[in-house]
Image: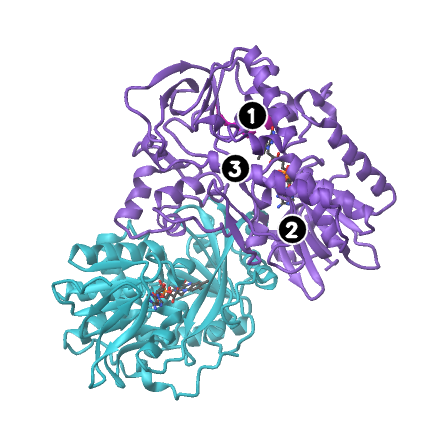
Chain colours: A purple, B cyan
Amino acid sequence: MPTSPSEPVEAPQSARYDLAVVGAGPAGLAAAVTAADLGLRCVLLDGGRDTGGQYYRHPAPGLGAARPDRLHHGWSVYTGLADRLAAHERAERVRFRGGHQVWALERTADGFAVHVTRGPEAADRTTVPARSVLLATGAYERQLPFPGWTLPGVVTAGGAQAMLKAGLVLPGRRIVVAGSGPLLLAAASSLVTAGAEVPAVVEATDYLGYARRPGVLAAVPAKLVEGAGHGGVLLRHGVRLRPRSAVVEAHGTERVTAVTVARLDAEWRPVPGTERRIDCDAVAVGHGLLPQIDLATELGAATRTAPDGAVGLRVDARLRTTVPGLWSAGETNGVGGADLAIVEGELAAHAVADRVPKPALLRRRTRLRKFAELMAAAHRPGPGWTGWLRPDTDVCRCEEVPVARIREAVDELGAGDPRTVKLLTRAGMGWCQGRMCGPAVACLAGPGEPGPDRRPLACPVPLSQLAAGPSGEG
Amino acid sequence: MLKTQRPPLDVVVVGAGVVGAACAYYAARAGLTVAVVDRGPVAGGTTGAGEGNLLVSDKEPGPELDLALLSTRLWRELAERFGAAMEYEPKGGVVVSATAAGQDALRAFAAGQAAVGVTAEEVPAERLRDLEPHLAPGLAGGFHYPQDAQVQPALAAAHLLREARRMGAELITGETVTAVLRGPDGAVRGVRTDRRRLDAPAVVNAAGTWGGELARLAGAHLPVMPRRGFVLVTEPLPRIVRHKVYAADYVADVASGSAGLQTSAVVEGTPGGPVLIGASRERVGFDRTLSQEALRRLAAQAAALFPVLADVTVMRTYRGFRPYLPDHLPAIGEDPRVPGLHHACGHEGAGIGLAPATGLLISEQLTGKRPELDLAPFRADRFPADTGTDA
Ligand SMILES: Cc1cc2nc3c(=O)[nH]c(=O)nc-3n(C[C@H](O)[C@H](O)[C@H](O)COP(=O)(O)OP(=O)(O)OC[C@H]3O[C@@H](n4cnc5c(N)ncnc54)[C@H](O)[C@@H]3O)c2cc1C
Ligand SMILES: Cc1cc2nc3c(=O)[nH]c(=O)nc-3n(C[C@H](O)[C@H](O)[C@H](O)COP(=O)(O)OP(=O)(O)OC[C@H]3O[C@@H](n4cnc5c(N)ncnc54)[C@H](O)[C@@H]3O)c2cc1C
């Protein structure tokens, strides 16, 4: 497995890379190996130590976890890609650099300077020159607050998955899984497989909305198999699926001890009188994923809003963004899962190399994207979810800004958009830079589609590294 | 199109930035019926993209310093009611110099300021650390300006507007002014937005960096141009910077007409914990591109002033476009060419500080009083029609 953390990338004397791939998840990994197959000189950068991204997250070798494949569908797909990467690395066609967090892309006369931080010291700055860049930075979880959501024991659904995959730890013994989206089933199934009890999977939508459109599902057999797989596991463990319901409150003082679940109407408003309490010691909540696209929007790349309200990059059939030389593959173009991410990575590599891909690959992408859009539409949060908030519910947990302060900013102080709410309340100014509270703040700020987030620094950067300036390579 | 509402308006203020907010506040307080229109939200323009330094220290004697001193007094009055809400902090400024020659220049500068009412106390090198324990060693000395203060600009604008609304002003956000209406005599009659018509005998141009475009809608030439700035925001820190601290060359940068990048970091702590480091100045139109060179210089200068900052993390950076007029003075007051059109824009890097004075002077003119300061230096017709092509 390719691991070479935190030694600086020395660009060979000759020149810059043909392609810098940012993100080594399924999309970036597939793109890098395909691009190398096609003769491009690539560097594959990831903030994490290893390749694999969110889907193929796996334990550090030292943990001695026996069988990462137990938690992964398609583990062999990953090992196939990883083997190809290793071969290309040996042949010096690709460099994988883990621990390389990209904080900005800068356009230069002949391509891009990719600005990287590798650690806390002034010398941990690297600037990677590349003719073109492929963004494959994936997604992060959409969170919608509810009373009690800041209690210890409340984790995100993806976070629970990630914890399991990375270190095989469970967030609790008796875990309620809640929110909306296909990740809930995956998370619940991993949790029960790992020995937890899951008293309920609480899904806000009528879960099977899209599955009832057989034409679409039949076209993506892999998804069907995966869905059935989860379904079977859950059935075997007697897990109850509660559709059209939500966790409207988490109870406890030191840590969560129970949740209140209520039915929702079609707009996601909690229906009074339907509340019931479920004892648990952990809650895994998720409301789908949001594309992580700061690096591209900062360069002015055009975006589009998916049916679930998530803002992703606008790309053409060749995966080109509207910024010349910048491509994008995977979740950055709208959330669609690992299979789609791989297909898009391969397609983007062809486009960067100016090769014509197999028509089948293009067709597969079209099919998977269509399915993704359908799923997104089914899981779009209804406007009524704010009905489960209370005035004192913290929306921004970094800066501890409750609902009431945000409502005051909107109703009394003239804030009509998330940016102004942030300026007037500090919501979104903490460590996560609004990634956690952004969607909720946007809903509370009023109607209208939220624009893309603007974060000139995609992640915090040590001041000494800014002061040092770009490293010698650029 | 929505009908004009009753009661009839005395004035329409275009722009809900801090300057428009101050104009609305003082006009409403003077008993006028006011409507404020902005195409975005409150503080969505440069006000939401700047810092809140209220400085007298960086201004040489002249019309701008007169405005700043009037504002200093007005900010104190405002702070009695809204101080906490606006995060007003009368923390004072400290200007430091690295060399003896620099300290001599500062001394001469401060003497000139003192003559018109600025308080400036010389701080010898060995006492600098009493004021700022974390300052770099080896500085030649500095000056302490107790009148310098700070507000949070967006909160200041929002609370001034909230108060104006309590006094009857109407706030209309999300509507763009598309025309300035004028009668046969050329005098202003109101504005048209993309949704309605607002009739009023006076219009205040508080459109900030876009003030030139608004003036053009009324047929007047006013060459307001953007001057870009970046600000760095660190992670939350304990109180390591107590005043607004900057190096003496800052004053030269502020007054410079050069288009090239200038930076001399002003370093300050905020009530929320983060330290702000800003801001660069550069004339590049409305180009939003992140400037690595601006970031590098701001970071390096901040670390040179406060070596401890070399070990902190920068959480984010933001940029804004200062509304800049060729002679670095704002346009304030009625336009001699267009009766009823009152300008309140072009404050460049001092619009937060100068907002209350601007608002007060405009309201005095609107109500037929003699303005507290002579408005002649701020006349909008002082620029020949061929000025204003940005380098
Ligand atoms: C927490 C979480 C858990 C998930 N669990 C599952 C699951 O169990 N099952 C499932 O089907 N799907 C899961 N997903 C969905 C997952 O996004 C996709 O299935 C798939 O991993 C997408 O592939 P990708 O290559 O587009 O992005 P990702 O796999 O997300 O890969 C993106 C990579 O980019 C890196 N990166 C991001 N920003 C930077 C930067 N600025 N600099 C350097 N590197 C950067 C990240 O470290 C990451 O390795 C999960 C998503 C999340 C967010
Ligand atoms: C990086 C940076 C740092 C700064 N630091 C300081 C500082 O420390 N101290 C200080 O005093 N100043 C500082 N400034 C300057 C200060 O921010 C500005 O001078 C001030 O905000 C200008 O306020 P304003 O109300 O005139 O303009 P704005 O806040 O820009 O308001 C103008 C408003 O007019 C609206 N508008 C424009 N055209 C129309 C139209 N046709 N119809 C409807 N609405 C319209 C816009 O939407 C906007 O909201 C800084 C600026 C920058 C960029």
Instruction: Classify A251 as above or below A406.
Output: above
Say left or right for A85 vs A361: right
Of the image marks 1 and 2, the number of the one nearer the N terminus: 1
Of the four image quadrants, the one with ligand 1 is top right
* Pair 2/3: label in front: 3
| Image x and y of residue A133, in percent | 68, 53
Looking at the image, how many numbered discs can be counted on the residues?
3
Q: Residues within 10 Å of mark 2 (few under 14, many from 20)?
A: many
Q: Residues within 10 Å of mark 1 (few under 14, many from 20)?
A: many
Instruction: State which chain disc 2 sits on.
Output: A
Cβ–Cβ under 8 Å for marks 2 and 3: no
Amino acid marked by disc 2: Leu
Residue A111 visible: yes
Would you name the residue on which mark 3 appears? A374
Cβ–Cβ under 8 Å for marks 3 and 1: no
Q: CA distance from mark 1 to mark 2?
A: 31 Å
Image mark for residue A319: 2
Label 1 residue SS: helix
Would you name the residue on which mark 1 appears? A160
Of the image marks 3 and 1, the number of the one nearer the N terminus: 1
Asked whether mark 3 lies closer than 8 Å to ligand 1, one says no
**Range of magenta residues:** A154-162
Instruction: State which chain disc 3 sits on.
Output: A
Instruction: Classify B389 as above or below A290.
Output: below
Label 3 residue SS: helix
Residue nearer the viewer, B248 or B233: B233
Q: CA distance from mark 2 to mark 3?
A: 20 Å
Instruction: Classify A238 as above or below B359.
Output: above
Residue at 33% x, 51% y is: A415
| Image x and y of residue A341, in percent | 65, 40
